[in-house]
Image: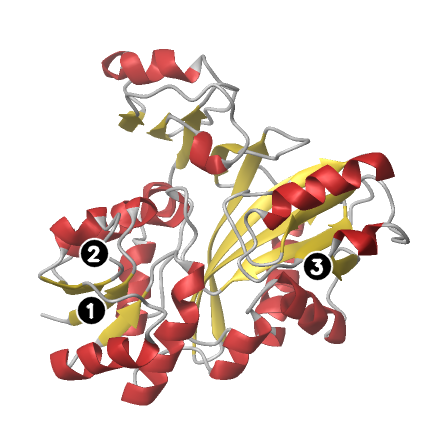
Amino acid sequence: MKKLAVIGANKPLEPFYRQAKSLGYYIIGIAYEKGAVCKQYCDKFYPVSFVEKDKVLEVCRAEMIDGITSFSLESALPTVVYVAQKLGLVSNTEECVRKLTDKYTMRKALDTAGIPNPRYVIISDTSQLEDLQVPFPCVVKPVDSGGSQGVTLVGKKDDLKSAYERSMEYSHCGKVIIEQFIDGREFSVEYLSCKGMHYNMQITDKVTSGPPYFIELQHHQPADISSELHERICDVVEKALTALCVENSPSHTEVKLSSNDELFIIETGARLGGDHITSDLVRLSTGYDMVQGAMELATGCFRDPDIRNKYFSGIYYFSSLTPDVKNYIDNAKEYPFIVETSCLNEEINDCKRNGDRMGYFIYQSDHKIIG
């Protein structure tokens, strides 16, 4: 039985924990104890914050782990790589961590490699807004946050300050990025990379609420695109992964196709994609368990994946923006394509970020279910 150290144990990681546990891994959870709902899946649990790198290293060395991961928790990646490098385990390099530290360093690395991504500017004080020259509409978001937290589309200069202040509430480093808004379709692209070889798992159609907050409301696999566009997306993503030094890890890349048929890399994370995309949807649409592949990669026994588009899969989120989804959740037994549902007891009336969604249903089918 392989020993797997997992950094982080909060609610969004639960689908990954469940899957890793079902695969027979011996799980050593290392996380700040408050909110550690995934503790129940751990064979051992250490209440240590991932900020304390050397304490985490001490635990992992004592436990003689075979691999380390943070599943989809991006903020823990510096610790994951630090520990893996110290113990001679499979991981990306410190250079990769530096390039993916935040959206600014990522943009610089992509620019250097000549990979298309939105134009941008970084600010850390409201005084910088006065003379700011940016095209409108533009997107304002924290440099170092995810999950659509603090993201706002701004249509005119008068609205920049309030959007900036909202983004700053979610910025850990006290910086905000203001970037060119790319109109058009949005995709997420999942990869596993081993020794610099990149293996495409799936491309997902993403449906958001649109402006101003871009809440993710639906994901569908495989993306409804031509083989030519599939190749173009894979080509630009693989170039981005190489430029960002993603060599030994899963990755989740957001891509937009503009109305002018141009592809732009919005951002990349050297981690598993959240929102059930990699924990469930890839497995349901291709028959390949991406969580298992990522764990095999982390523990040094990765095998070339066999990826085939067998089915259609997806997820619909219930929120104040999508009240009709609740009917499917409540009556799931009437819909044979529904494989999983979840719903909160509380009601959130104002949906401004992914964390404000109240439930979901996941489907698998031999035909498209989009509507």
Question: Which circle's residue, 3 or 1, is located before the other in the chain?
Answer: 1
User: For the N terminus, which image quadrant?
Assistant: bottom left
Residue 279 or residue 227, whichever sits in front: 279
- Residue 9 coordinates in the image, percent (x, y): 26, 54
Upstream in sequence: badge 2 or badge 1: 1
Q: Secondary structure at mark 2?
A: helix
The quadrant where residue 223 appears: top right
Disc 1 target residue:
4
Mark drawn on residue 20: 2
From mark 2 to mark 1, how far is it between C-alphas?
Answer: 9 Å
Q: Helix, strand, or loop for circle 3?
A: loop
Residue under the point 53% across and 58% down: 172
Give the amino acid at mark 3. Answer: Ser
How far apart in space, not on screen, are marks 3 and 2 (Cα)?
Answer: 40 Å
Amino acid type, label 1: Leu
Q: Which residue is mark 3?
A: 124
Question: 172 or 56, which lies in front?
Answer: 172
The amino acid type, in three-letter code, at marker 2 is Ala
- Sequence-wise, the earlier of marks 3 and 2 is 2
Residue 199 appears at what percent x and percent y?
46, 65
